[in-house]
C-alpha cells in the first residue's frame, strides 16, 4: 500500500512538471520572417584545446531574417558564435532583471552565452544573414530553445 501511494505521488509530480513545460512552450514567442538553413552537424570526438565536451554535437547554420523580422525569444543550450555576413540587427538580451541592447552590422561577430535568453530583430534596410556555430548541442536535440518573453525588454 505504501509503495502504491509513493508511485501515485511520483506520477502526480511528473504530470505537474510536464504541464509546466507545456505552459512555458505555449507562451514562447515564435520567430518572424526567419529562415534557418542547417549547414553541418557533427559529434565532437576530439580532445583538442577548445573546451568542448566529447560526445556533444557542434552544429552550423545560415540564418536569414527579413527586414522587420525577428528571432523570437530564444536560448541555446551550448551558446552560439555568430558572424554577421550581411545587414544590421539588434540583440535584446535579458540578463536578470536588466535588458542589454547591442546592434551589429556586416563583418562583426558576437557570442550568445549558454542559456542566455535573447531576441534578435532586423533593424536594417535589407535582410540580415548570419553564419552561426552552436557548440555543446546535446546529441539529437535542437540547437535552439524557444522561450517566453521575459518581460525585461519593454516594447520588444
Image (cartoon, helix red, strand yellow):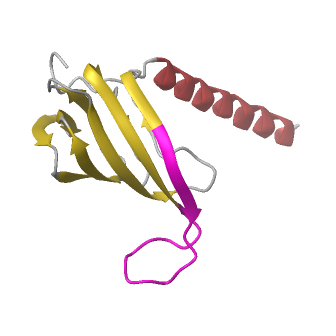
46 inside magenta stretch: yes
- Residue 33 at x, y = what percent? 36, 20
Q: Nearer the viewer, residue 97 or 69?
A: 69
Q: Residue at x 41, y 21 (%)?
A: 30
Residue 117 visible to an observer of this rendering: no
- Residue 135 at x, y = what percent? 43, 60
- Quarter of the image with the C terminus in it: top left
Q: Residue at x 32, y 28 (%)?
A: 65
Q: Nearer the viewer, residue 21 or 92?
A: 92
What number of labels is visible?
Answer: 0
Q: What is the chief secondary structure element of the magenta stretch? A: loop
- Judged left or right of residue 64, residue 3 is right
- Residue 34 at x, y = what percent? 38, 27
- Judged left or right of residue 113, residue 144 is right
- Residue 125 at x, y = what percent? 15, 23
- Judged left or right of residue 110, residue 115 is right
Kindly indicate the quadrant of the structure image that contains residue 50.
bottom left
Q: Residue at x 34, y 49 (%)?
A: 131
Residue 106 visible to an observer of this rendering: yes
Q: Which residues are magenta?
A: 37-57
Q: Nearer the viewer, residue 101 or 150?
A: 101
Kindly indicate the quadrant of the structure image that contains residue 151.
top left
Q: Is residue 89 above or below residue 138?
A: above
Q: Nearer the viewer, residue 52 or 25?
A: 52
Q: Residue at x 10, y 40 (%)?
A: 102
Q: Is residue 55 above or below residue 27?
A: below
- Judged left or right of residue 82, residue 145 is right
Q: Is residue 41 above or below residue 76?
A: below
- Quarter of the image with the N terminus in it: top right
96 inside magenta stretch: no
Q: Residue furthest right?
A: 1
Amino acid at each position: 500500500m505504501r509503495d502504491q501511494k509513493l508511485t501515485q505521488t511520483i506520477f502526480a509530480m511528473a504530470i505537474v512538471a510536464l504541464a509546466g513545460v507545456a505552459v512555458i512552450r505555449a507562451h514562447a514567442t515564435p520567430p518572424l520572417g526567419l529562415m534557418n538553413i542547417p549547414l553541418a552537424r557533427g559529434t565532437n570526438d576530439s580532445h583538442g584545446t577548445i573546451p568542448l565536451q566529447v560526445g556533444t554535437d557542434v552544429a552550423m547554420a545560415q540564418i536569414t531574417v527579413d527586414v522587420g523580422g525577428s528571432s523570437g525569444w530564444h536560448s541555446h543550450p551550448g551558446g552560439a558564435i555568430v558572424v554577421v555576413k550581411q545587414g544590421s540587427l539588434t540583440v535584446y538580451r535579458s540578463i536578470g532583471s536588466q535588458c542589454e541592447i547591442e546592434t551589429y552590422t556586416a563583418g562583426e561577430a558576437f557570442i550568445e552565452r549558454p542559456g542566455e535568453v535573447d531576441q534578435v530583430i532586423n533593424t536594417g534596410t535589407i535582410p540580415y544573414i548570419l553564419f552561426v556555430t552552436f557548440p555543446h548541442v546535446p546529441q539529437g536535440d535542437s540547437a535552439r530553445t524557444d522561450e517566453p518573453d521575459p518581460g525585461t525588454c519593454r516594447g520588444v
